[in-house]
Image (cartoon, rainbow, N blue to C red):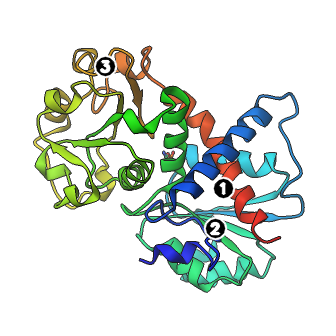
Amino acid sequence: MSANLQLDSQGRLVHLLTTEGLPRSLILHILDTAAQFVSVNEREVKKVPLLRGKSIFNVFFENSTRTRTTFEIAAKRLSADVINLNIGSSSTAKGETLLDTVWNLQAMDADMFVVRHAEAGAPHLIARHVKPGVHVVNAGDGRHAHPTQGLLDMYTIRHYKQDFSRLVVAIVGDVLHSRVARSQIHALTTLGVPEVRVVGPKTLLPKDVERLGVRVFHDVAAGLRDCDVVITLRLQNERMSGPLLPSAGEFNKTYGLTPEKLALAKPDAIVMHPGPINRGVEIDSGVADGTHSVIMPQVTFGIAVRMAVMAILAGNDR
Ligand code: CP
């Protein structure tokens, strides 16, 4: 999959498909722009006219609570018109192809597509077939990428820890099936985090994951020791092709984040999770709702980060 599809010849963002290959300066520009929108979102009138007259289509072929809703809120706060295509009642059920659906929506003057799809590469396919000036944002494709989640996670880490260059970050759980983990790893390494760890059983870590610049831990105590940031991931059963674990209960005993395991991390460690959480599986309620958890701020920051991405994309048309 070509990461370069998302940048024009001058290095400006035309689509957001992956964090892989995104220059550090561009990631920081997105985070800095998001910081301005955090201020907008704290005002009584949470609206700016940047995308007035633009039409943004949310096209979600997979379920979503956080991503779809925060993209809608973000687009509305930028004054865009938002259209949520209901895939369940769309003509996809009558055999219309993905590209035919997109071309028909494009004929309704779409300016931007926000796309979630179970097939890795679907947003890239769309990006290759839309008219110049129409932007595509990947809202999660298969196990490949979820770039705005990765970016909002970087925003959250910077908010609480300020300096990426001194951090130890552990990503714990089902990394194998996680598009979020891949997007986080690319962003964390680009931003200069010196130690990114992946922690989990062999069956839930990608082969050769070290090539992404991470350290591998199968022992959870060693993996969590002295971490600044602990990111937990749910078991993504919908993408598993067979049984990779004895049971969810066994996984919880070994890798589930409990207050006792979290005590191995630094005393001021933050706990993150992209959601949805499965309480009592990858994370105990005492941790999810505890003082180290920044899971709800992640969701809130997601609005500003998605505003930033859409504003930057639309701004590059001018
Ligand atoms: N984190 C995330 O993508 O959540 P949703 O599936 O609810 O959008």
Residue 45 position in % (x across, y down): 88, 33
Q: Please give the label number shown on residue 13.
A: 2
Question: Label 3 CB, ligand 1: below 8 Å?
Answer: no
Work out whether mark 2 precedes mark 3 in sequence or the reverse, and give the earlier one.
2
Give, as a three-letter code, the residue at label 1: Val
Q: Nearer the viewer, residue 22 or 81?
A: 22
Q: Which of label 1 and label 2 is nearer to you?
A: 2
Residue at screen point 55% across, 39% down: 155
Q: Quadrant of residue 271?
A: top left
Residue receiving disc 1:
309
Residue at screen point 63% across, 79% down: 101
Residue 95 position in % (x across, y down): 54, 82
- Residue 68 shown left or right of residue 282 in the figure: right
Q: Is residue 73 above or below residue 81?
A: above
Residue receiving disc 3:
266
Give how far apart the Cα atoms at labels 1 and 3 are: 32 Å
Residue 93 position in % (x across, y down): 55, 74
Residue 192 position in % (x across, y down): 40, 47
**Residue contact at pointers 1 and 2, CB within 8 angstroms:** yes
Secondary structure beneath disc 1?
helix
Give, as a three-letter code, the residue at label 3: Lys
> In the rendered image, is residue 251 in sight?
yes
- Residue 77 shown left or right of residue 101 in the figure: right
Quadrant where the C terminus sits is bottom right
Q: Which of label 1 and label 3 is nearer to you?
A: 3
Q: Quadrant of residue 126?
A: bottom right
Q: Is residue 74 above or below residue 112?
A: above
> In the rendered image, is residue 65 in sight?
no
